[in-house]
Image (cartoon, rainbow, N blue to C red):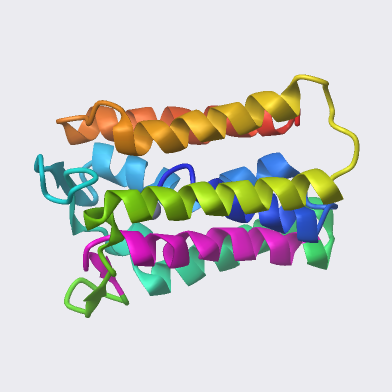
Amino acid sequence: MLAGHYASALALSAAAPRAPLWALCIAAQCVDIAWSVFVVTGIEEAHIEPGFTASNGLVLAQVVYSHSLVAAFLWALGAALLAFAWRRDLVVSLAVAAAVASHWFLDLPMHTPDLPLAGPESVRVGLGLWNQPVLAFGLEAALLGLSGWAFSRRAGPPATRWGRPALFATLGLLCLAGYFGPQPDHIVPTALTGLFVYLTLPMLASRA
Ligand SMILES: [Zn+2]
């Protein structure tokens, strides 16, 4: 899941409007930001095997530090502490923690069983919806649509007139590209492209 993770940022921003959307966007992809860095630096192992799932060829061989359930909760705890040091606002900290933890629970239905519960030898889980691309795309699009609607109803006036439509259009395009766009065949460019999205999309969110 790529674009769909931003659904949790939009929904949590609707539930806790004091938490800035751009911060929730970084939080929702914190696990994948770590993954991109760990894959590029060789700390974690992943590669592309075309046709591995019907949606993409992503093979996560060892992703304990970024994508285990225990790690997701530790990332969430770290992010919550950081957010509290920054804003001194418990609601904002909880929203940030929920956005970070939500990543793992949104990956769970999509991934093949490659998400470890704890260490490298622990049970790996994943419901494999990526093998049903139409269903997977429908789920991501529905989550984005619903959360975008909730965000539009609850959020204050947009920072700029173009910001919100531009953000929604970008998320829609990312969602389409994830399933119907060209599939990458090397892992490092994939991770770096992801990193570019994870770091630039929050800038767009700050204008929405
Ligand atoms: Zn992920």
Residue sitting at 80 percent across and 65 percent down? 91
Q: Residue furthest right?
A: 157
Q: Quick check: 164 above or below 43?
A: above
Q: Residue furthest bottom?
A: 123
Depicted 183 relative to depicted 153: above or below: above
Disc count in the image?
A: 0
- From the viewer's perspective, tell me whether residue 102 is left or right of residue 55: right
Q: Is residue 49 left or right of residue 33?
A: left
Residue 190 vs 51, above or below: the answer is above
Q: Quadrant of residue 80?
A: bottom right
Helix, strand or loop for the magenta stretch, by majority: helix
**Depth check: 79 or 47 in front?**
47
Answer whether residue 88 is magenta in the image.
Answer: no
Foreground residue, 61 or 54? Answer: 54
Start-end of magenta stretch:
92-116
Q: In this view of the protein, which residue sits in the foreground, 155 or 119?
A: 155
Q: Is residue 28 visible?
A: no
Q: Position of residue 166 (x, y in %)?
A: 65, 23
Residue at (50, 71) in percent of width and height: 73
Q: Is 20 left or right of 4, judged from the image as shown?
A: right
Q: From what the image shows, is residue 98 above or below residue 147? A: below
Quarter of the image with the C terminus in it: top right
Instruction: Classify residue 208 as left or right of residue 195.
Output: right
